[in-house]
Image (cartoon, helix red, strand yellow):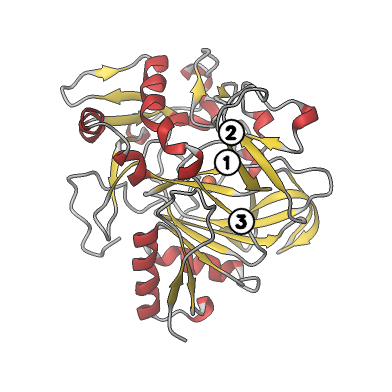
Amino acid sequence: MPITCHPIPKAPESEVDFGVEVRGLDLENLSETDFKSLRTILYTHQVVVIKNQQSLTPAAQYTLTRRFDPSAGVYSHGTSISNKSILHRDLTTIPSQPQVQVIGHGHVPSYEGLTNLNLQHPHHRTFHKHPIPESLDRDFTHFYRWHIDSAMYDLDPPLVTSLLAVTLPPKRHQTVLYSDDPTTTSPSLRVPLGTTAFISGSNMLSLLTPEEQSFILTSKIEYAAHPYIWLRNARSRSTGLGIITESLELPLSSLPPISPDKIKTYPMVWKNPVTRTLAMMVYPTCARRIHLADGSVIDDLAEVRETLYKLQRRAIEPQLVYPHDWEEGDLVLFNNHGVMHSIVGSFGEGEVRLFRQCNMAGSRGPLGPEDPVPVEGN
Ligand SMILES: [Fe+2]
């Protein structure tokens, strides 16, 4: 069967210019030629949807995901996640395939060697400063956290992530509110329950003024050491796009030992290895400092966050967000160096959802605007 590309459903008002459905792939027996086609499609469209993959094994999901970065090995957050990390409660490792995690919501008696799972879909009330009131929680929600899959300390961000929808609850919709006040008329976005929302880093870059583009093209962003422990007491903005500065971050003395050589400082603009397109890729939640071209450093945390928020906020306007409408068997692959994404939604009692996520820490850091594309092409 030939490989074909098809548009993914979008709302009439959507201005999203990425994402594609691909048909005609046998993922358990993918030839090198077909994989190369898939890779080109992925880097061209950023988000790829492959339907009806219910029978894909965790091993096959791992093998496929790893083909995008054959030198990668460990899971994106390493071999173990500290119980002090805010990620600890969200991820359950599949015993036979430690690069594949089970995520979801509700009680699952057994799955892939795991038994009696009680999964918790990350709910914004555990992370946001102003959660939706309990009485409105069924119908309204917030973007949980816009992010790049990444440890942002020691390990580099995965090149590609795969997500497989194994089990979904009956379909219903929620409205994502952008404001912390549900009574105001700020932007909102109607989404399927438990959508994964994506935005384009290229689009984020294109929305900036020439002066802003020049600033981010020449600046670098330094991420905090052990960021997910550091920020465990801090609280997010209601847009899910970064943290409200209240000095709630843990002091460095309370963190595990810090190795300066493991601190990540990345360009703010990353290059697509196939199309050479540039994208603004900054993970505001974990950001600590901005290093400017002239050698000066913005060290003040509030100023770092305000600077990033001004640059990034316009890219999450409702018409620029792609909220994937999951169906059981959907496998979504995305360019983790080209799009940002967010968990969304608040599940009710009895709404059981089971997903598998796979990614591995990148075998290289992101490509900056001036970096050559590696010979092997990844
Ligand atoms: Fe993620």
Q: Within 10 angstroms of label 2, few (less than 14), some, or many (20 or more) residues? A: some
Give the CA separation, mark 1 to mark 3: 30 Å
Q: Amino acid at mark 1?
A: Ile
Nearest the viewer among 56 and 113 is: 56
- Helix or strand or loop: what does disc 1 sit on? loop
Q: Residue at x 24, y 33 (%)?
A: 213
Beta carbon of the mark 1 residue lies under 8 A of ligand 1: no
Give the label, 1 or 3, closer to the camera: 3
Q: Amino acid at mark 2?
A: Ser
Position of 200 compared to 167: left or right? left
The first of marks 1 and 3 along the sequence is 1
Nearest the viewer among 204 and 244 is: 204
Give the CA separation, mark 2 to mark 1: 7 Å
Q: Amino acid at mark 3?
A: Asp
Where is residue 343 shown, x and y percent of the image? 59, 43
Residue 145, placed above or below residue 350: above
Badges 2 and 1: C-beta atoms under 8 Å apart? yes
The first of marks 3 and 2 along the sequence is 2
Position of 44 compared to 15: left or right? left
Badges 3 and 2: C-beta atoms under 8 Å apart? no
Position of 244 compared to 123: left or right? left
Where is residue 259 shown, x and y percent of the image? 38, 30
Residue that label 2 marks? 85
Residue that label 1 marks? 81
Where is residue 285 shown, x and y percent of the image? 47, 30
Residue that label 3 marks? 325
Q: Residue furthest bottom?
A: 1
